[in-house]
């Protein structure tokens, strides 16, 4: 879905706003929505480790940015531990030999450092890149209304804009937050159901 498809739902409420500004706020809403709900998820194309190499640059789908890791399989080890970067580096510095992975920017790092070739499968969540013009159609079908509320909340909150309205900003922000909370709950329920159905767990 192209973010500009939502302009007819936004522009009538902010007279005088340009399509460029409105589209930018829709994109901001989409990025925030995905960051907080993890509704956009993907499995990357598997790749192989290289001996004595701990870091691997990941290639997310076009026009997307990585939010967080959800699952990493290395060789025969499924769903290895995932740590935040600070904890991971502290463990590495302490000489920890346990298997775990972490994300640093767009790079996946593995501990211990691989000493042979092993297949790696990565499952992660995404958000639109800063230059994106849209997101997957299925997300648009399910969450277009959330982006409308999110865009209107920040547009109404713009200082000195002719269409600025504190009350409307608050109302649309509350609607956006409700959509975020519902999507996050549904995402969590889906993950729990998937884990209950299969072993090893999906992510």
Image: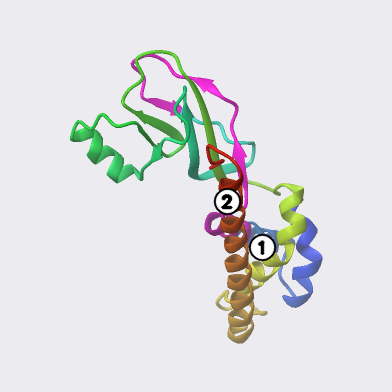
Where 125 falls versus 73 (above or below)? Answer: below
Decide: is 10 above or below 117: below
| Numbered disc 2: secondary structure | helix
Give the percent coordinates (x, y) of residue 196: 57, 48
Q: CA distance from mark 1 to mark 2?
A: 36 Å
Q: Extreme left residue here? A: 94
Give the residue at mark 2. Answer: 191
Residue at image point 46% right, 18% down: 118
- Residue at 64 percent across and 83 percent down: it is 168
Q: Residues within 10 Å of mark 1 (few under 14, many from 20)?
A: few
Range of the magenta residues? Answer: 29-56
Q: Is residue 116 left or right of residue 199?
A: left
* Residue 65 x/y as whole percent: 55, 43
Q: Quadrant of residue 51?
A: top left
* Residue 163 belongs to the span the image colors magenta: no
Q: Quadrant of residue 43?
A: top right
Image height of 33 relative to 171, above or below: above
Question: Which residue is at the front of the view, 98 or 153?
Answer: 98
- Element marked by disc 1: helix
Residue 47 inside the magenta-drawn segment: yes
Q: Earlier in the sequence, mark 1 or mark 2?
A: 1
Measuring from the top left, give residue 93's x and y in whole percent. Answer: 20, 34
Q: Is residue 109 left or right of residue 126?
A: left
Residue at position x 36%, y 43% in the image? 83
| Position of residue 187 in the picture relative to residue 85 (left or right) | right
As rendered, which of 27 and 78 lies closer to the eye?
78
173 or 159, nearer to the observer:
173
Query: Who is closer to the viewer here, 36 or 120?
Result: 120
Instruction: Determine which residue is flagged by label 1.
Output: 21
């Amino acid at each position: 879905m192209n973010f500009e498809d939502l302009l007819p739902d936004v522009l009538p409420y902010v007279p005088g706003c340009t399509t460029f500004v409105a589209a930018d706020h829709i994109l901001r809403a989409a990025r925030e929505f995905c960051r907080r709900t993890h509704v956009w998820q993907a499995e990357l194309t598997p790749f192989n480790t290289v001996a004595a190499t701990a870091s691997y640059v990941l290639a997310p789908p076009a026009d997307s940015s990585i939010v967080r890791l959800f699952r990493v399989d290395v060789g025969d080890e499924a769903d290895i531990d995932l740590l935040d970067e600070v904890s991971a580096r502290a463990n590495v510095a302490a000489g920890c030999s346990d298997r775990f992975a972490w994300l640093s920017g767009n790079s996946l790092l593995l501990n211990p450092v691989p000493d042979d070739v092993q297949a790696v499968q990565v499952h992660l969540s995404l958000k639109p890149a800063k230059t994106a013009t849209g997101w997957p159609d299925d997300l648009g079908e399910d969450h277009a209304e959330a982006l409308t509320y999110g865009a209107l909340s920040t547009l109404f909150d713009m200082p000195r804009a002719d269409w600025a309205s504190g009350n409307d900003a608050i109302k649309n922000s509350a609607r956006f937050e409700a959509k975020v909370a519902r999507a996050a709950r549904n995402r969590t329920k889906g993950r729990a159901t998937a884990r209950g159905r299969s072993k090893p767990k999906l992510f």
